[in-house]
Image (cartoon, rainbow, N blue to C red):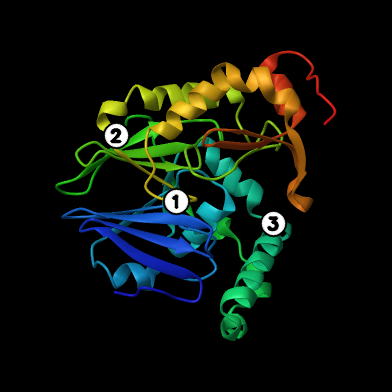
């Protein structure tokens, strides 16, 4: 089994479960059945990860995207067919620009400079920026509750809008594993983009409540960022935060600036870490925000 490449580290979590971590930032998961394998998300696409997969299994691979952000979808160019919730195909199209790809390419170069400088010559950042997913992808749109039969293992699609309008999670009820994408993670949640990219806070809260109702079928949560696995305590914290704590205490939040990505305010509550804009918060509150000068 390949355990590392220029951009990726691979870890076996169980006989049927592997995690690939790319550029130290994003996790994607390989779940093995008896007849088929599912890859949940595909990373930035800095390199072809198919050799990694083939070092683990020879079974057919089905790529399912939790959502369309570049750190999840750019790598899908190596697979062609991709399964996702329909609204997030629009996300993929929106990010399929030279400008966006140049920004991601710079991230790849910076990662290699800091971690594997001898490999920089093997990463063609200019060619990366020129590529296009639309020339290679064939989308297949999934539905809430849809089941993927891998042979001796079934994964269920859970529609969870919030981080994006078409965000999904995948649930393995037998093993009590939830693959949560960017909606539940030990990492910052970004909510300072316009409303055509992030769904309203109210939809995110409904999604967390939906997952809470499934808690008897969930033990371990495998997210796309941060530590893994995490527990339902994270879901409880999101629900508590957005059911009143956030509304009561946002005025004390401190500003942040993430350069070209955006700026706004940061709210921290227990395991919740969210960066948001006043515009998105006002949408949730139904009135203008009022802040305390700190």
In space, the residues marked 1 and 3 are separated at their CA atoms by 27 Å
Asked if residue 219 is positioned above or below residue 119 in the image, the reply reads: above
In space, the residues marked 1 and 2 are separated at their CA atoms by 17 Å
* Image quarter hosting the N terminus: bottom left
Rendering coords of residue 209 (x, y %): 43, 22
Q: Give 163 or 141, whichever is nearer the viewer.
A: 163
Label 2 environment density (alpha carbons within 10 Å; few <14, some 14–19, many ≥20)? many
Per the image, label 2 sits on a secondary structure element best described as loop
Q: Is residue 108 left or right of residue 214?
A: right
Pick whichever of labels 1 and 2 is earlier in the sequence: 2
Badge count: 3
Front: mark 2 or 3 = 2
Rendering coords of residue 121 (x, y %): 61, 85
Q: Residue at x 64, y 51 (%)?
A: 95
Q: Give 23 or 248, whichever is nearer the viewer.
A: 248
Rendering coords of residue 141 (x, y %): 42, 39
Per the image, label 3 sits on a secondary structure element best described as helix
Label 1 environment density (alpha carbons within 10 Å; few <14, some 14–19, many ≥20)? few
Per the image, label 1 sits on a secondary structure element best described as loop
Q: Residue at x 34, y 75 (%)?
A: 2
Residue at the disc numbered 3:
100
* Image quarter hosting the C terminus: top right
Residue at the disc numbered 1:
227
Pick whichever of labels 2 and 3 is earlier in the sequence: 3
């Amino acid at each position: 089994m390949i355990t590392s490449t220029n951009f990726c580290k691979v870890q076996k979590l169980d006989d049927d479960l592997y995690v690939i971590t790319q550029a130290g930032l994003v996790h994607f998961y390989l779940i093995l059945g008896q007849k088929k394998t599912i890859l949940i998300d595909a990373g930035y696409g800095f390199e072809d990860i198919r050799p990694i997969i083939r070092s683990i299994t020879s079974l057919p691979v089905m790529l399912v995207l939790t959502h369309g952000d570049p750190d999840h979808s750019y790598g899908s160019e190596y697979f062609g067919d991709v399964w996702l919730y329909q609204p997030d195909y629009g996300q993929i199209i929106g990010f399929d620009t030279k400008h966006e790809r140049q920004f991601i390419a710079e991230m790849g170069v910076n990662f290699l400079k800091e971690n594997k400088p001898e490999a920089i010559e093997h990463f063609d950042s200019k060619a990366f920026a020129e590529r296009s997913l639309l020339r290679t992808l064939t989308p297949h749109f999934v539905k809430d509750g849809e089941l993927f039969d891998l042979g001796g293992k079934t994964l269920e699609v859970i529609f969870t809008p919030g981080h994006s309008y078409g965000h999904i999670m995948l649930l393995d009820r037998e093993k009590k594993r939830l693959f949560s994408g960017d909606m539940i993670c030990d990492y910052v949640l970004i909510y300072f983009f316009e409303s055509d990219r992030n769904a309203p806070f109210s939809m995110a809260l409904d999604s967390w409540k939906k997952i809470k109702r499934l808690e008897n079928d969930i033990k371990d949560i495998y997210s796309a960022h941060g530590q893994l696995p995490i527990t339902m305590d994270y879901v409880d914290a999101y629900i508590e935060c957005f059911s009143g704590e956030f509304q009561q205490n946002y005025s004390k939040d401190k500003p942040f600036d993430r350069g070209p990505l955006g700026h706004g305010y940061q709210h921290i509550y227990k395991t919740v870490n969210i960066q948001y804009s006043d515009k998105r918060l006002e949408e949730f509150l139904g009135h203008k925000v009022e802040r305390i000068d700190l």
